[in-house]
């Protein structure tokens, strides 16, 4: 079940328009940790797949939370490499949609162990 985010997030000030409401699934404690955003192509080469996984695992070992968009390709590799409990998946769809469908299981795992911010 999603919850409304009521605490103010200063790092969102840089957005052109601060969201009027945000919802989330998961643990807000990840927001307190250092974060690195990893995004990339939906069709990565073998080298990119290997490097993304290695980078996400190395960051997670050092206590850095990996943030990505739960898309196919590099995003999914980054989330998986960091571990579902050490990642934030930023999505723009509704709370009842797991998109892309190919990443449904990954997104559900992040909902339970990481954090999934959702815009209403």
Image (tube, rainbow, N blue to C red):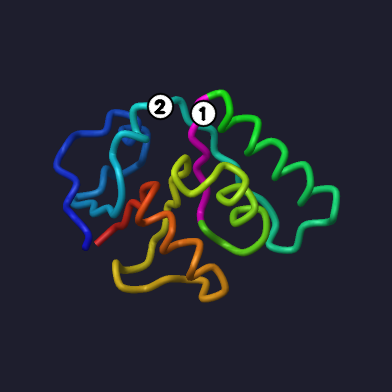
**Disc 2 packing (10 Å; few <14; some 14–19; many ≥20):** few
Would residue 16 appear left or right of 63 to someone viewing this image?
left
Residue 102: image x %, image y %? Answer: 57, 74
Residue 30: image x %, image y %? Answer: 37, 35
Disc 2 versus disc 1: distance between alpha carbons?
6 Å
Would residue 28 appear left or right of 91 to someone viewing this image?
left
- Determine whether 70 is above or below 50 in the image: below
Front position in the image: 75 or 53: 53
The quadrant the N terminus occupies is bottom left
Front position in the image: 36 or 29: 29
Q: Identify the residue under disc 1.
A: 64
Q: Which label is found at residue 6?
A: none
Q: What kind of element bears circle 1? A: loop
Front position in the image: 109 or 103: 109
Q: What kind of element bears circle 2? A: loop
Q: Identify the residue under disc 2.
A: 33
Residue 92: image x %, image y %? Answer: 39, 61
Residue 68: image x %, image y %? Answer: 52, 48
Contact between marks 2 and 1 (CB within 8 A): the answer is yes
Q: Who's the residue at 40% across and 27% down the image?
A: 33
Residue 65 on the magenta span: yes
Residue 83 on the magenta span: no
Would residue 59 appear left or right of 114 to someone viewing this image?
right
Q: Who's the residue at 47% across and 71% down the image?
A: 99
**Disc 1 packing (10 Å; few <14; some 14–19; many ≥20):** some
Question: N-terminal of the two: label 2 or label 1?
Answer: 2
Front position in the image: 2 or 40: 2
Q: Quadrant of residue 118?
A: bottom left
Q: Who's the residue at 53% across and 45% down the image?
A: 83
- Determine whether 98 is above or below 91 in the image: below
The quadrant the C terminus occupies is bottom left
Magenta-highlighted residues: 63-69
């Amino acid at each position: 079940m999603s919850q409304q985010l009521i605490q103010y997030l200063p790092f969102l000030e840089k957005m052109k328009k601060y969201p009027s409401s945000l919802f989330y699934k998961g643990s807000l404690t990840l927001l307190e940790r250092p974060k690195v955003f990893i995004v990339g192509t939906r069709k990565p080469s073998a080298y990119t797949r290997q490097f993304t996984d290695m980078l996400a695992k190395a960051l997670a070992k050092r206590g850095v939370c990996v943030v990505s968009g739960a898309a196919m390709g590099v995003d999914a590799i980054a989330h998986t490499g960091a571990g579902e409990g050490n990642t934030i998946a930023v999505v723009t769809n509704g709370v009842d949609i797991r998109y892309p469908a190919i990443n449904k299981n990954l997104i559900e795992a992040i909902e339970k162990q990481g954090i999934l911010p959702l815009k209403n």
